[in-house]
Image (cartoon, helix red, strand yellow):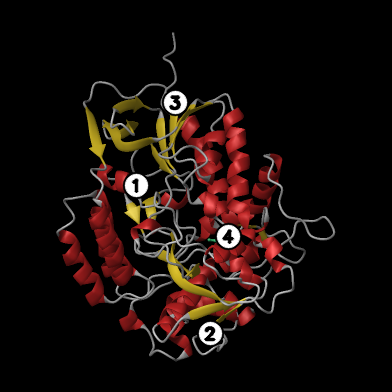
Amino acid sequence: MAAPRQPLVVVGHGVAGLSAALAAAPAPVLLVNRARHGEGGASLLAQGGIAAALAPGDSTAAHARDTIAAGAGHNDRDAVLRLTAAAPAAIAWLQAQGVAFDQDARGGLALGREGGHGVARIVHAGGDRSGARVTAALLARARAAAHIQWREQVDADALLLRAGAVVGVRLRDAAGRCEPVEAGAVVLATGGLGALFAHTTNPAASAGSGLALALAAGARVRDLEFVQFHPTALRADADGATLPLITEALRGAGARLRDHRGQLLMAFHPLADLAPRDIVARTVWQAQRKGPVWLDASALAPGWEAGFPTVLAACRAQGIDPRSQPIPVTPAAHFHMGGIAVDADGASSLPGLYAVGEVACNGVHGANRLASNSLLEGVVCGRRTGQVAAQRARASTPSGAATRLCERGPDLGDAERTALRDLLWRAAGPVRTGEGLRQAQVALRTLADSGWEARLATALLEAALRRPGSLGAHWREADAAPAGVAPVVGLRAGADAPRRAALEKA
Ligand code: SIN
C-alpha cells in the first residue's frame, strides 16, 4: 500500500501563501498562521494595487524596463521578464477568483499611476483597499478548497531537518504546546521584516520570523541590506505601532510633496513626485532635517476621497481633513527586497524548503521594488511555487537519519525590541553611514543572545556594511553628493544607468 502523502505545509496566509496553497491542489496542504486567518498580515494593508501592462500602448517590456530602472539595475533580468509577462494573466486569474477590480467610466479596468511607472498600469480594488479585497477573495477560495486544512494561531517556530533536507515544522500554540508536523515540503510565506524598524508601515507580525527560521536552519539568504522605505507614511503618534500608509496612488492622482516652507519637494526630478520610491524617500528624509514635510492634495478633483477611503479614515483619526489640510508625512520601512535566496520555482538552498513573497528573494525587485509589484509577485510566484512544491513534495520523509530541530529561538522582550527598532531606524534607515552601521553592530552584541530579532538585525547590518557604495534603497551617506544638489537622491553612472536611460526616455 502506498504511504499516505505528507502534506505540503504553507506558513503564512497573505496573498503569496494563499496563492501557493490554492495552486498546490490536489496535493494536501496544511496552511498555518500565527494570527487568525484573515487578520494581521501586510497583504491586508496594501493600498497600492497590482501592476500589469494592460493599457493600449503599454507593453510587458515597458513594465520590465520600469521594474529594472526602479531596482537600480540590481534585478535578475529573467525574473523580471517572467513576472511582467505573467502580470496580465495574473489579473485575469484574480478576477476569476472573485476580485472585482475598479472600473473606468467605460467599464474597462481603471488604471492608475504610481512612482517609477512610465504609464498608468495599476489596477485597484475598492480604491485603496486593494490588498484587503484581494486577500479576502483568495481566503474565501481557500476556505472552500477541500485540499486545504487550516491551523490558526500557531507559530512555526522551528524547522525539522533530516539528512540535510527540511522535513517539517514544529508548531507552537498560544499556550506554548509544541507539536512536530512532518511535511512533504515546507513553503515559507511569512512576509518581510519592516516591523524591526521604529517607523514602519508593516504590522507588528512582519518582523522577519520566517527569515530568522531559514537563517537558523542554514538556508542561503541574499540582499539583506535592501530595505525599502516608503516616503509617505502618515506622521502620526502611533506609539510604536504601524504608521498608516498614505498610498503613492494619491501622488499618482496629483498630490504633491512640499517642504516646511511650502516649496515643491520633488520639482528637481524629471518624474517629480512619481520618481522611484527610494529617491522620494531619501528626499523626504533629508528635507525633514530642516522641518516637517507635507503631502498636499488640494489640487485633486473634488470627491477624490471616494477612491481613497483608507487614507481619509487614517487622516481623520489624527484630526486631519486631507481635503483641506496638508497631510504630515514621514518615510517608514515598507518592504524588504532581500530574503531567503530562491530560484524561479521558489526553491531555497535547502532541499524541501521553499519561500515566496516578501520573505523570499528571487532577485526580481533588485535594490528597490517598483510600486505595486509586490502583490503581483505574491500571486505569480506564489502559484508557481505552490505547484512546484506540491509536485516535488516527498511522499515520505527520509528515514534512518536523526531529525535535527532548527529553532528560531526566543523573542526579545518588549523593552529590548523597542531599543532594537530605534537602533535599526537610526543606523539602517533611508540614509546610512559606515560609522552608524558599525556602532549599531556593537550595540546589538549585547542583545544577540537574548532574541532572534537581534540576530536577524545583525545579519542585516553585516550585509549593509559589506556594501560600501550606495545602490537603490541602500544609501550610504558618505557616497552621496552634497545635500541640496539634485543628484543627492541618486542618478550616477554604473549601476544607475538603467534609471538614467529610463528617465531620459520619460
Ligand atoms: C502604496 O500604495 O503606496 C504602496 C504600494 C506598494 O507598496 O507597492
Image coordinates for residue 6, horizontal then vertical, percent: 42, 23
Indicate left or right for 392 with 63 as reference: left
Above or below 494: residue 267: below
Q: Residue furthest right?
A: 106
Estimate the spatial distance between the alpha carbons at disc 1 and disc 2, rounded to whole Å: 37 Å
Q: Which amino acid, mark 1?
A: Ser
Image coordinates for residue 486, horizontal then vertical, percent: 48, 89
Of the residues tagged 3 and 4, which is closer to the observer? Answer: 4
Above or below 283: residue 313: above
Q: Are marks 2 and 3 in contact (CB under 8 Å)?
A: no
**Disc on the earlier residue, 1 or 4:** 1
Report whether the residue tagged 4 is closer than 8 Å to ligand 1: yes
- Residue 445: quadrant of the picture: bottom left
Indicate left or right for 424 with 304 as reference: left
**Disc on the earlier residue, 3 or 4:** 3
Kindly state the secondary structure of the residue where label 3 is placed: loop
Of the residues tagged 2 and 3, which is closer to the observer? Answer: 2
Q: Which residue is mark 3?
A: 7
Above or below 341: residue 444: below
Q: Nearer the viewer, residue 440 or 75?
A: 440
Q: Are marks 1 and 4 in contact (CB under 8 Å)?
A: no
Q: Which residue is mark 1?
A: 209
